[in-house]
Amino acid sequence: MSDRPDISPEDSAEAAEYALGLLSGSERSAFEARLASDADLRAELAAWQSRFAEIAMSEVEEVTPPARVEKALLGRLFPAPAARPGWIERFGLARLYGAVFLLAALLLWVVVDLPPRPAYPPENAAYSAQIAAEDGSLVVIAQYDAARGELYLERQEGDARPGRDLELWLIAGEEAPISLGVLNRDQGRERLALAPELETALSDGVLAISDEPRGGSPTGAPTGDVLAVGAVSEV
């Protein structure tokens, strides 16, 4: 799907797999390392995330499948009697069964497993993003209030590692990541004031959270692991 001549079909496919949470641990780490220095790859990832976000936000008519189809699909999704896995785990299983099964799992997730909205959405939210780790260990919902120029954050899962801080970054196109601030360690909800000139960058950007030393990155750029990523979409 890429319209960027510097992106190979293989890199475009890998960006799509990362957006869907299909890369293994080593593959994911290698891809995230490339993101920090490859603006074309970041743009390709943002394009895929926007495409999947559109799918997730589309109105899908709920259809009750025949009992035999539902039973077969659920049997392949959840073969063990253990607790139902999260949506990222489902995508990991879907990769084993090929593209057709992946599409079925994606549609199932769109209908029945959309992430919950924040408990306090701003009244004038213009943009939103779900910034999430692939394994669901860190989930932060972000909503931008255009009237106030504030970014509302609700951390639903995860916290900083011992002796470390979580730092929020805005990545827009080919520009270097812009730090939006260090997240408060003791609050699940907080809000950050954004400079007016950042609203345009936010509208088609990607939000990411990295693991940094106490007080944030000492270099003005991400120095630690990229823990969670989410594309910004218009509300």
Image: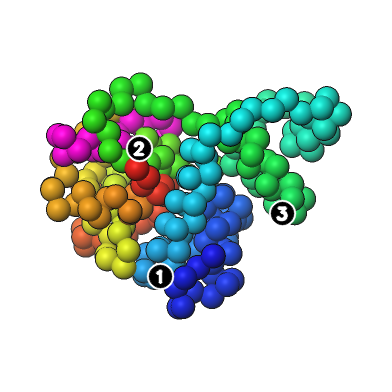
Q: How many marks?
A: 3
Residue found 26% across the figure and 27% down from its top = 122
Of residue 164 and residue 24, the one placed in the foreground of this image is: 24
Q: Residues within 10 Å of mark 2 (few under 14, many from 20)?
A: few
User: Which image quadrant is residue 186 in?
Assistant: top left
Q: Read off the magenta span.
A: 142-162
Residue found 20% across the figure and 38% down from its top = 146
Give the residue at mark 2.
235
User: Can you give x and y, in whole percent of width and height, for residue 38 in the image?
Assistant: 39, 70
User: Can you give x and y, in whole percent of width and height, for residue 59 in the image?
Assistant: 53, 34
Q: Earlier in the sequence, mark 3 or mark 2?
A: 3
SS state under label 1: helix
Give the residue at mark 3.
99
Residue found 42% across the figure and 57% down from its top = 46
Whether residue 163 is in magenta: the answer is: no
The image quadrant where one finds the C terminus is: top left
Q: Residues within 10 Å of mark 3 (few under 14, many from 20)?
A: few
Give the residue at mark 1.
40
Q: Earlier in the sequence, mark 2 or mark 1?
A: 1
SS state under label 2: loop
Give the spatial CA distance, label 3 vs label 2: 30 Å
The image quadrant where one finds the N terminus is: bottom right
Question: Is residue 128 shown above or below 167?
Answer: above
Residue found 41% across the figure and 27% down from its top = 117
Give the spatial CA distance, label 2 vs label 1: 26 Å
CB within 8 Å, label 3 to label 1: no
